[in-house]
Structure formats: C-alpha cells, structure tokens
Image (tube, rainbow, N blue to C red):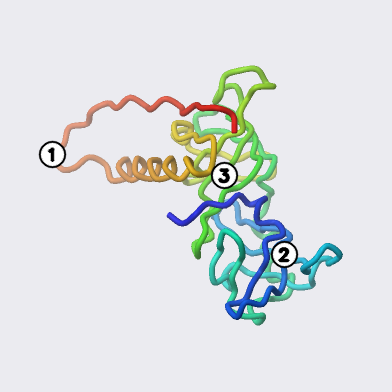
Amino acid sequence: MSGLTAARDLAKRPVVTLDGEAVAQIKDTVFDGPAGRIVGFTLSGRGLLAGPLRQSLPWEAVHSLGGHAVMIRGREALAEPAAVVARKEAAGGHVLGARVLTDAGAEIGTVLDIVVEGGTSGRVVGFRIAASESLVPGSRRRRRKVYVPRGETLAVSGTALVVPAGVTHFVADDLPSFVGQIDAFRARAGREGAGPAPGARAVPVEADAPKEGPTP
C-alpha cells in the first residue's frame, strides 16, 4: 500500500509539474463519499497573499499524490472549476462532522478527517474519528481520536456514515500503525468474502478486541 495522507494535510500542498514548476496549491479536497475516492481538488495560488484560482484539478489529471507535492504532467492538466465543483454537488453530502454508525446500530463517533491512499489510486481507505464511549470507554474529556478502516461503506450523507461493524476491531491511534490495520482488515474481509474452501467445516472465530493505546 502507498503512504497514507489525511485530507486536511493536503491543504496548501503544492501542485507541481513533472518539469518542476509549482503552478498552484491545494485549497480543498473534493470526495465522492459513496464511491470512496477523490474527485479532485480546488486550487489557490502560491504565496501568502494568493487567493483562489479559477481553475481546478480533476483526479484523472493527477500523475501522483506524494507526501510533499501533488504531481501533474503539465499546466494543461488544470481545468475549469466546474470540472470538480459540479461533481462535488453530484456526489452529495459532506463527510466531515458526520456521525459514524455501524450496520449493527452502534454509534462509534464523528468524522474528523478522511484518510486517502497516496500514489495514483485516489482511494479513501479510512476515517479519523472522535471516538464515542461505545468504541473507546472513558469520560468524554479523555476519549481518543482514532483511525478506523472505511470498508465497503454502506451509506453516506451529510449527517451519518454507515460502516460495517467489523471495522471496530481494526482501530489505530496513528497513521503508521493504521497501515497494518487496513491490511489486516482487508485480509479478513477477503477470507470472509471467499467463504469456506470446498469440504471445509465452518468453525466459530472469536472477534479480535478493539485496539487501544496512548492518546496521540
């Protein structure tokens, strides 16, 4: 898996051509929540006094999402604002601030940020949430901010995000450890999706306990 990046950390990240020219910086990241992927970016100019640009960057024109820059082949990759903004409206709903519910009916927190995979996939792989007491027991003041996998998100709207209950067994406290949790979650989901091998007998498996650790 490529490196993970929190969507909020993409703000002000430079947009650089393969010739090394910094042509803009990221203003907002636009998502298609139900599809679980980046649609594109709105842009601003470079520098402290620069304002919004009348251009956008569709995801299809991104060469690579790197840890320090968003790479494009050239200035021709930039498009009219409607190329991204119109798709934002079509995608429907905002994820940040939404309540997170499992398909078993438990509320596990609210969305603080979205975690995307670097490189060329543009996939949303998880969320940073303010964990509720049902996920992380303790007083409201001491509750943690944790990362949970996206899974195959069942529904998303401006007020609620519904995820599989199984994601609660793959919680991480920071992005480096979240990589391993995503891999483990995908491996488990793959085994369950494949079903038992021919002639195999089903055996009950105890669910893993939620991961806990120090507050980041």
Comes first in the chain, label 3 or label 2: 2
Residue 187 horizontal/vertical position (percent): 34, 44
Residue 184 in view, yes or no = yes
The residue to which callout 1 is attached is 199
The answer to whether 124 is drawn above or below residue 187 in the figure is below
Quarter of the picture holding the N terminus: bottom left
Residue drawn 73% across the image and 66% down it: 43
Mark 1 or mark 2, whichever is nearer to me: 2
The residue to which callout 3 is attached is 155
Quarter of the picture holding the C terminus: top right
For the residue marked with disc 3, what is the amino acid? Ala
Residue 109 horizontal/vertical position (percent): 62, 31
Residue 85 in view, yes or no = no
- How many numbered discs? 3
Residue drawn 59% across the image and 67% down it: 59
Crowding at dot 2, Cα within 10 Å, few <14 / some 14-19 / many 20+, comes out as many
Along the line of sight, the residue nearer the viewer: 102 or 78 = 78
Quarter of the view holding residue 205: top left
Quarter of the view holding residue 74: bottom right
Residue drawn 66% across the image and 40% down it: 112
